Each structure stands twice: as structure tokens, then as C-alpha cells.
Image (cartoon, rainbow, N blue to C red):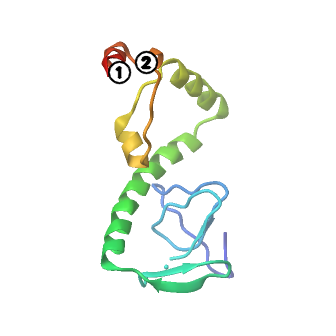
């Protein structure tokens, strides 16, 4: 969205969700969010935004690691959003048919899944039943 005479330039490797508003550069923007480029290591929140506090060093380190995780996840979402609906629907059917645990993806999201043994691949189902 343009603001007065300023127009955003979105890098080809950036992901911007359809319902997002972009103000600033170098960020992945998530559904329904409005982000501003907050560079001074300060926390602002609200509508309109108000200054809350400065970030501690450990919070800055966490945000740096989170940014890497979100960059990776943004690439996944960008790829999914570029697909036509019928392809997404077909892949959803395939995922249900061949359900398996993707531990790396789940770990990145902080998700813990329990899959019924009948949906697991044979080698994992046997281990799960022995527990």
C-alpha cells in the first residue's frame, strides 16, 4: 500500500499474506498483521501503538532466532499461496491418505502430534504399539 509519495518494494523472496499491511522492509508479514520497522529495540503495542518497554539482551537474541524460523516458514507459506486451489485441495487429500510425522516441521512450529497407529507408516506403528 502506498503512503503519500512512498511505495513499498517487496523483495521477490519475501512473503506477504493477502490480508497483511506492509509498513517497513525485511520482514515476513503474517495474516491480519500490521508491522512497522520497531529498529530501536523497543516494544510498542496497541492501536494506535504506544511504547511499552525496551527489549532485554536475551529477548533480542530470541527474536533473532525467531526471525530465522519465520523466514523459513514464510517460504513454505509463500509456496502454498502461489498454488491454485485445486492443487492445494488435491495435496490435502494426499496428506490425509499418507499421513506421517514431519518432526522437523513440527519442531519448528512447536507442535507435538500424536498420530493413531493405524495412520503411521508400518515401522513407526510397530514402535508405537510397543510403548
- Quadrant placement of the C terminus: top left
Residue 87, located in which quarter of the rendered image? top right
Residue 29, located in which quarter of the rendered image? bottom right
Instruction: Using the image, determine if residue 119 lies above or below residue 83.
Output: above
**What residue sits 63% from the left and 61% below the top?**
20
* Mark carried by residue 5: none
Q: Secondary structure at mark 2?
A: helix
Residue behind mark 1: 128
- Proximity of marks 2 and 1: CB atoms separated by less than 8 Å: yes
Residue nearest the observer in this picture, 112 or 68? 112
Instruction: Using the image, determine if residue 107 lies above or below residue 48.
Output: above
Residue behind mark 2: 117
Query: Where residue 43 sits: x, y (%)?
Result: 49, 80
Furthest-front residue in view? Answer: 131
Query: Where residue 104 sits: x, y (%)?
Result: 34, 40
Query: Where residue 127 sits: x, y (%)?
Result: 30, 19
Left or right: 98 as drawn, with respect to 125: right
Crowd around label 2: few <14 · some 14–19 · many ≥20 (10 Å): some
**What residue sits 65% from the left and 54% below the top?**
18
Residue 122, located in which quarter of the rendered image? top left
Left or right: 72 as drawn, with respect to 46: left
Q: Upstream in the sequence, badge 2 or badge 1? A: 2
Q: Secondary structure at mark 1?
A: helix
Amino acid at each position: 500500500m502506498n503512503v503519500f509519495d512512498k511505495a513499498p518494494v517487496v523483495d521477490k523472496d519475501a512473503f506477504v499474506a493477502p490480508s497483511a499491511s506492509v509498513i517497513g522492509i525485511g520482514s515476513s508479514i503474517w495474516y491480519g498483521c500490521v508491522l512497522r520497522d520497531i529498529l530501536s529495540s523497543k516494544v510498542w503495542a496497541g492501536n494506535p501503538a504506544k511504547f511499552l518497554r525496551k527489549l532485554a539482551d536475551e529477548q533480542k537474541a530470541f527474536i533473532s532466532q525467531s526471525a530465522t524460523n519465520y523466514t523459513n516458514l514464510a517460504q513454505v507459506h509463500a509456496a502454498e499461496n502461489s498454488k491454485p486451489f485445486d492443487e492445494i485441495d488435491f495435496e490435502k487429500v494426499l496428506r490425509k491418505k499418507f499421513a506421517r510425522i514431519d518432526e522437523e516441521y513440527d519442531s519448528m512450529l512447536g507442535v507435538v502430534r500424536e498420530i493413531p497407529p493405524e495412520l503411521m507408516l508400518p515401522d513407526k506403528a510397530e514402535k508405537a504399539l510397543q510403548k
